Image (tube, rainbow, N blue to C red):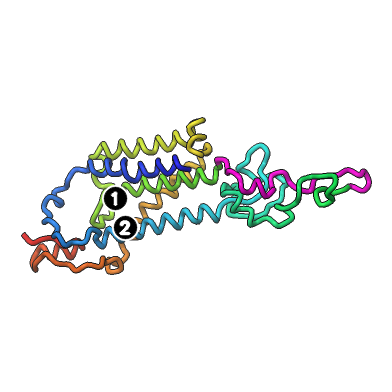
Amino acid sequence: NVIQLLWVNMIMDSFASVALATEDPRPDLLERSPYPRDQPLLSNRMIRQLVGHSGWQLVILFLMIFALGDVCPPDPANHDLCEAYGKLYHDAVGTMRSGRPESYDSQYFTYEDTCIPPFSEDDPRSFVLNEETEEMTPARPEAYCVTEHGGHTPPSRHFTILFTVFVLMQLFNQINSRKLHGESNVFVGILDNRFFVLIMAMEFLMQLVMVEFPWVNLAMGCKGLSMNDWILCIMIGATELPVNIAISYLPLEWFKPRSSIKGFKKGDDQDKAEKDDVPMLSR
């Protein structure tokens, strides 16, 4: 959904930059020496954070897209559930019906499921004949024909959960981004910056409105979620916090940028630079 992409862009760029730019400078940052001109734009730590968190998010999203979602005829009362006694074409994790495009899920159907011709008394392939009553029953299920599998996919619980999880992962990663030099406790001083807290709260409330409020969620391509769904989304999004700690244990040598390190001399500043993995100019 295009509007969802615009919202994600606002979270990751506009709101995140405002929230992080309002952080007050700490004494240890004010005491740091300036960076040399030939210092790489991306430090070892920055590359490690980028690769680690993007890799984790890709794993979660791919699992949610392809491991979840049963392929089956929809329940007439709730299209996010399978028909009670309908045929199950693909049994995925959980009981939620797939929200993937039907053009993709059609790979799970057999030729008979997708290519049975429309009902016609002149075409014996299109119906099943009851020899006793001579009644003709259409052979093709209404929801499974070639043209429908290529059509528009309506808002689904499956992809609404996917969208919400991705947004919440960005929000929790904003907390990680407050600390730049591998600090394990990313919550230190978070309540001292009221702008950061307010922006985080506003982003979460706007996501809640986009998913739960009628007409708004329709414009966003979303469907209302249950309390259990929200708890699940928050728990998955919060995995960014322990993953950030795990990423900090990856060797920095694996993420060294291809650039010569110049611009500082031996001494105390060099020791600090090597410890922090960000070379600084000597005073």
Q: Is residue 201 above or below residue 262?
A: above
Quarter placement of the C terminus: bottom left
Residue type of the residue flagged with mark 1: Ser
Residue type of the residue flagged with mark 2: Gln
> What is the x, y in percent for residue 112?
74, 55
Q: Nearer the viewer, residue 229 or 224?
A: 224
Residue 178 horizontal side relative to residue 152, left or right: left
Mark 2 to mark 1: distance in Å? 9 Å
Q: Indicate the quadrant where residue 209 lies.
A: top left
Q: Is residue 245 above or below residue 188?
A: below
Residue visible at 58% across and 50% down in the picture = 69
Q: Which residue is mark 1?
A: 177
Residue visible at 89% across and 47% down in the picture = 130
Residues at circles 2 and 1 in contact by the CB criterion of under 8 Å: yes
Residue 193 horizontal side relative to residue 5, left or right: left
> What is the x, y in percent for residue 108?
65, 56
Residue visible at 44% across and 50% down in the picture = 236
Disc ID at residue 41: none
Magenta part of the chain: 130-155
